[in-house]
């Protein structure tokens, strides 16, 4: 397991544990109890003829150093391995250095100590037992104190308090955006990657899991952008940090993004700007807030005004997943676990997306929207009517945000569900009266956990790749008749990454041959991610090897495979129709479809 380690936090926690150990020992010595004085031993070993204060200082520095070194070892190899409370986990880890201290270091100190060798201090003997058991017991107690303090302090190695900025982001003196030459409209098939940019909050909004910080993008953004071009790619899904930019109503800080924007234009990168990715600024709280849709629409309008060269947008990423994990499963943001909160989150996310698309279109009428959504599917395990009913309900519910976005009337059972859980009829009618489909591409994301089995206990269990992207994306296409894009995929097992890449690509080829207009493919993300194996529900710092590059920015095998794939098929897809032509054709089809559905 590769870990993202908060080295400064680990060092400070280890030193604090060592300090606590010394405070307890010093108090016991002053009270007259027989206790092994580890700082005194280290001090006289280093400076045998120095004054008491100089000797104690030297001993304390060595004690702190050893505590810090073991703390880093704990942070990398032991932290979060056991499902225990932090204090107990640290205490158990103390049993790693403890026997080394008792059986090796302590006897060695005796043999090495110049004052013992000269007879000025008496030898404590093997394991310190000649004078009783107090010395080894003192070492045991001291280690337990150190480990407990270490465990209490070394927590949450990734993320940061939600009311602060990440330390790794460095303003570089923002400059106004470049005024680029008019962009060519000859966009065809888009081979893309993405920068993982999720930023939900945990712990009732107090802690933010910012993937751009955890994955090092704030430090290495110039390198990351260059890596995109080194792969032979032009298109990049990119999520500007909404929580760091949108500071309040009418207040924005564009410093970081201005620099990134200028570098993208210099390198010829075409971004698909992901404006809201699983989180909100602190002042908006969470997705239960009815002010969210208009606030995000205002942000989108100002964004399009400031960066008029940007043409491709994902207004809100994976609305279904965001609502489900925030309001139904209780992992992020509002951390609710009820149906009404889920429906509320879906309404606000979908309305925000509609208003954002309208705001951007008002500033740039030729903007293209890539509405990225998770490709979900639920399979009943058995012919039990109740199990089949649950699977059918979930298979309808997965479409809710897109139904609102694309003004597609929902099933009558789903309509009753919405009424039951607080959606007013006039709001539903409002969604059905909007029309933002004309410039929309439907992105369908696919991972090995997207297909789920409703088991005999009515629980949804990950099924793995049973039907695949071809079948799942086909369901979404049949429902919405929009041009498609494979907008996200990766594999948690880095060894299997290249094989998974080619499977996904052949799914894309197959569905294109079946006549479905697919305009892009994405391996997500450019670099490894952190804690996505547990859906960001805890800040553990476990690195997931899913990137085209690792967090040192060295290429993974899947990165080399993707580079080869792009070279191999690049000339083939360059003959595909332009995205403008695909959108125009889809719009003509959609007009008739809307009339039929609303008839």
Image: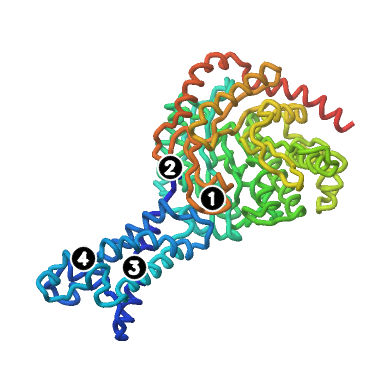
Q: Considering the numbered disc 1 on the image, is that residue within a helix, a strand or a loop?
A: strand
Disc 1 from disc 3: Cα separation = 44 Å
- Whichever of labels 1 and 4 marks the residue nearer the N terminus, that label is 4
Q: Quadrant of residue 467?
A: top right
Disc 3 from disc 2: Cα separation = 47 Å
284 left or right, relative to 208: right
Q: Nearer the viewer, residue 162 or 79?
A: 79
Question: Split into 4 quadrants, where in the image is the C terminus?
Answer: top right
What is the number of the mark on residue 252? Answer: 1
Q: Residue at x 47, y 44 (%)?
A: 543
- Whichever of labels 3 and 2 marks the residue nearer the N terminus, that label is 3
Q: Nearer the viewer, residue 137 or 398?
A: 137
Disc 4 from disc 2: Cα separation = 60 Å
Q: Quadrant of residue 139?
A: bottom left
Give the answer, above or below, for where 72 lies relative to 113: above
Residue on which disc 3 sits: 18
Residue on which disc 4 sits: 109
Q: Quadrant of residue 362?
A: top right
Disc 3 from disc 4: Cα separation = 19 Å
Disc 1 from disc 4: Cα separation = 60 Å
- Whichever of labels 3 and 4 marks the residue nearer the N terminus, that label is 3
């Amino acid at each position: 397991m590769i870990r993202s380690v908060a080295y400064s936090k680990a060092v400070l926690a280890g030193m604090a544990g060592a300090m606590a150990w010394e405070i307890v020992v010093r108090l016991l010595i002053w009270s007259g109890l027989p206790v092994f004085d580890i700082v005194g031993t280290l001090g006289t070993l280093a400076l045998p003829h120095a004054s008491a204060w100089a000797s104690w200082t030297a001993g304390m520095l060595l004690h702190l150093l050893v505590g810090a070194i073991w703390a880093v070892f704990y942070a990398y190899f032991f932290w979060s391995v056991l499902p225990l409370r932090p204090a107990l986990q640290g205490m158990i880890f103390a049993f790693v250095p403890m026997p080394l201290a008792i059986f090796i270091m302590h006897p060695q100190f005796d043999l090495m100590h110049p004052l013992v060798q000269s007879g000025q201090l008496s030898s404590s003997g093997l394991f310190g037992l000649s004078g009783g058991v107090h010395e080894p017991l003192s070492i045991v107690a001291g280690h337990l104190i150190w480990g407990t303090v270490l465990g209490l302090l070394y927590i949450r190695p990734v993320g940061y308090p939600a009311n602060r900025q990440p330390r790794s982001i460095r303003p570089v003196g923002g400059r106004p955006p470049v005024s680029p030459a008019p962009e060519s409209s000859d966009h065809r098939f888009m081979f893309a990657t993405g920068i993982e940019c999720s930023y939900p909050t945990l712990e009732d909004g107090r802690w933010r899991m910012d993937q751009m910080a955890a994955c090092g993008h704030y430090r290495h953004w110039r390198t990351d952008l260059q890596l995109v071009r080194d792969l032979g790619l032009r298109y990049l899904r990119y999520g500007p940090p909404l929580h760091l930019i949108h500071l309040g109503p009418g207040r924005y800080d564009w410093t970081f993004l201005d620099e990134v924007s200028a570098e993208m234009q210099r390198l010829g990168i075409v971004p698909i700007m992901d404006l809201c990715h699983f989180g909100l600024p602190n002042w908006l709280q969470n997705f239960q807030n009815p002010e969210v849709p208009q606030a995000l629409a205002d942000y989108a309008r100002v964004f399009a005004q400031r960066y008029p060269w940007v043409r491709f947008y994902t207004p809100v990423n994976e609305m279904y997943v965001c609502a489900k994990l925030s309001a139904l499963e209780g992992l992020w943001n509002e951390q609710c676990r009820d149906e009404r909160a889920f429906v509320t989150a879906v309404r606000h996310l979908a309305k925000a997306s509609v208003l954002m698309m309208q705001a951007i279109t008002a500033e740039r009428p030729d903007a293209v929207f890539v509405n990225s959504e998770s490709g979900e599917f639920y399979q009943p395990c058995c012919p039990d009517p109740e199990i089949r009913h649950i699977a059918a309900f979930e298979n309808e519910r997965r479409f809710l945000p897109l139904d609102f976005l694309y003004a597609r009337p929902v099933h009558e059972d789903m309509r009753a569900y919405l009424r039951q859980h607080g959606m007013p009829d006039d709001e539903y009618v409002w969604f059905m009266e909007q029309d933002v489909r004309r410039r929309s591409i439907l992105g369908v994301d696919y991972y090995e956990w997207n297909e789920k089995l409703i088991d005999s206990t009515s629980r949804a269990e990950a099924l793995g790749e049973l039907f695949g992207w071809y079948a799942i994306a086909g369901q979404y296409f049949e429902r919405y008749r929009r041009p498609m894009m494979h907008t996200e995929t990766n594999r948690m097992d880095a060894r299997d990454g290249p094989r998974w890449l080619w499977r996904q690509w052949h799914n894309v080829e197959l569905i294109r041959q079946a006549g479905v207009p697919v305009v892009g493919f994405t391996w997500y993300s450019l670099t490894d991610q952190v804690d996505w194996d547990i859906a960001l529900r805890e800040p553990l710092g476990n690195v997931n090897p899913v990137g085209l590059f690792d967090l040192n920015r060295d290429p993974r095998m899947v990165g080399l495979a993707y580079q080869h794939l792009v070279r191999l098929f690049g000339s083939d897809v360059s003959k595909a129709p332009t995205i403008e032509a695909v959108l125009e054709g889809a719009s003509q089809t959609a007009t008739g479809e809307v009339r039929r559905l609303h008839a």
